[in-house]
Image (cartoon, grey):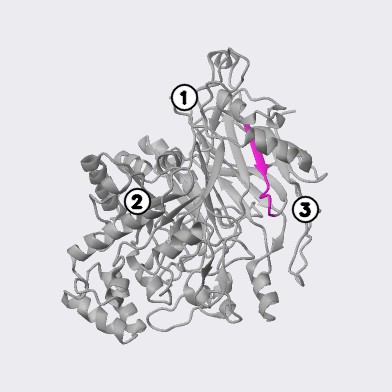
Amino acid sequence: MNSQIGRVLGYGAVCWLAALSVAAADTAGASQPSSTGYSPHVGSDFPRQVYWGDTHVHSAWSVDAGNQGNLEIGPGEAYRFARGEEVTAHNGMAVKLRRPLDFFLLSDHAEFLGVLPRLDADDPLARSTEGGERWYQLRSADDASGLWGEFVKAMLSGTDPIGNPELHADIWKQVVANAERYNQPGVFTAFIGYEYTSSPDGENLHRNVVFRDGADLAVQTVPFSSLESPNPEDLWRALETYERETGGRVIAIPHNSNLSGGRMFATETFDGQPLTREYAENRARWEPLVEVTQYKGDSEAHSFTSPDDEFADYESWDTVTIGGQRAGNDTVAHSYVRPALKQGLGVQAEHGANPFKFGMIGSTDAHTGMATAAEDNQWGKFSRDEPSAERWDVPFWDPVDGIQREDFRNWKMAASGYAAVWARENTREALFDALVRKETYATTGPRMTVRFFGGWEFAQGDETTPDLAKRGYTGGVPMGGDLPAASQSAQEEGPRPPTFLVSALRDPEGANLDRVQIIKGWRAADGSLQERVYDVAVSGDRKVGADGRARQDVGSTVDLAGPSYTNRIGAAHLSAFWRDPDFDPDEAAFYYVRVIEIPKPRWTAYDAQFFGIDMDDAVPMVTRDRAYTSPIWYNPPS
């Protein structure tokens, strides 16, 4: 047999496999087990744990959060919530995560970072400029509309009405101190960072900036904001300056590309110039990851560019940009992750470097300070979006002109997502290094354990061995890596296709798995960019056809009256050995894994039941949560 080999393990084997094979490894310098001595683990040095986190949460220190109801949940409350503590939301209800997060980035906006709490405290430094005093008066008069108008005007014009560098630097020191206070190496990682919020013409080019370093280095800089420049290349230059002057490390993570109006993955620069090799190398260097899923929709794939993929268009927000401007199919190819990965192959063929060679993570973009991503524990983006009988039908975004846009009704918000990182330990350094090497995956909320290895000599049966991680690292590379050159003996035997190992374990407190897919994209000999979806492991007794797909649906156990579901369908664990049946050694390609859960109630179903309300027929009540791994790339021999 060649491809489409999938095995389903019984639940009794799940715990066995989880205990023995929850690992991925660092391809750079991971030592292998010793060949001498009785203990097979002597000398092994690869990550044995997946860590869960959110790199995109805002507190009351962000202007948009603080001006739209978040007055209570500042940095301290946000950190404590992420660590698993109970907090009181703005609607008066108690809220807590089912399980704590392992790492967390409080990414308050660089633009006017922490200004509102300082004004609320009547801080003389915050009021010391004409703009600061004007904002103080607006805040004191509870004129949220007037302040919001000033904020939007500043963001669109690139001007700073506060004009207070001393205040900016002083607040940054507090941001750094807050992260230091909650950082517990080995227990809970609090990254230092912020959000760079470039929104030219209302198009989302936001980035979250993540430092590897502690306070000693991070305080030597200040956040670079879009008020200084909306051009992400200028952000990269600021990050380069930080590294050169301090010896530290920092990266930027683009997010929410689906609302970028086609600019996040454009094949021209911010200034409209053709891409160059230098641009491609710089982007790949500073932006090794992309946030593929969050509250404002999912950016993995769209049916316009993936018409044969029935699982595309998951929680799509595809009709507008972040500023409310209309978007259309002409922007999809440059706003979604899968077509961007394909475009990267095209740019590489032309310029010798791939600007879109990124891994994937998810995060929430919560502005409540509460990083919730579960369907039954969804607390909304802004404080006014917390659970209530009305929230499903209120506008998600209130434009300054007061127009209510159906595109932004709250029921379209997704309960998503989280970042999963394979690392040796729960520290800033280990997690950051894993982010850089792209040993990561995204989920839309569930904490599935997913691993993905690519190589040339894996064999059928390797996917069921208890030492899958060891085999994966000995014979190949993990998610985020590049396939190595084939061995000399393999080259002498002639072209052979790459082989892959996949293992997906359901969230132990979540839904069973429907299927595991490998998504392949490649640049064909004629220069066209192609893609194909392969079902490599499916639950139940369904069969994968000659086209590489299992067309029979898994079914559903959802009871909306509960709402509830059961795991009597699907599988607790799916694993697969897969060999690319369509491989051409002369064609550059990428491969990533998508894991699909069985159907379960969406957050709107829980709202409808809890508050006893009837929603419009257009409101979806069922969802199919999923995971996306970072790709593995193949590059033809030069």
Residue 498 shows up from this direction: no
The kind of residue tagged 1 is: Pro
Residue 294 or residue 87, whichever sits in front: 87
Residue 290 shows up from this direction: yes
Residue 125 appears left or right of 486? left
Crowd around label 3: few <14 · some 14–19 · many ≥20 (10 Å):
many
Which residue sits at x=21%, y=42%?
A: 245
Which residue sits at x=46%, y=39%?
A: 434
Residue that label 3 marks: 554
Residue 590 or residue 438, whichever sits in front: 438
The magenta stretch is 500-510
Residue that label 1 marks: 637
* Residue lying farthest to the right in this orientation: 541
Q: CA distance from mark 3 to mark 2?
A: 42 Å
Q: Quadrant of residue 511?
A: bottom right
Q: Quadrant of residue 580?
A: top right
Q: Earlier in the sequence, mark 3 or mark 1?
A: 3
Tell me the quadrant of the picture where the C terminus can be found: top left
Crowd around label 2: few <14 · some 14–19 · many ≥20 (10 Å):
few
* Residue lying farthest to the bottom in this orientation: 141
Tell me the quadrant of the picture where the N terminus can be found: top right
The kind of residue tagged 3 is: Val
Give the image location of residue 353, x and y in percent.
38, 37
The kind of residue tagged 2 is: Glu
Task: Tell me: residue 227, above or below residue 410.
Answer: above
Helix, strand or loop at disc 1? loop
Helix, strand or loop at disc 3? loop
Which residue sits at x=43%, y=69%?
A: 73
Q: Earlier in the sequence, mark 1 or mark 2?
A: 2
Task: Tell me: residue 584, above or below residue 153.
Answer: above
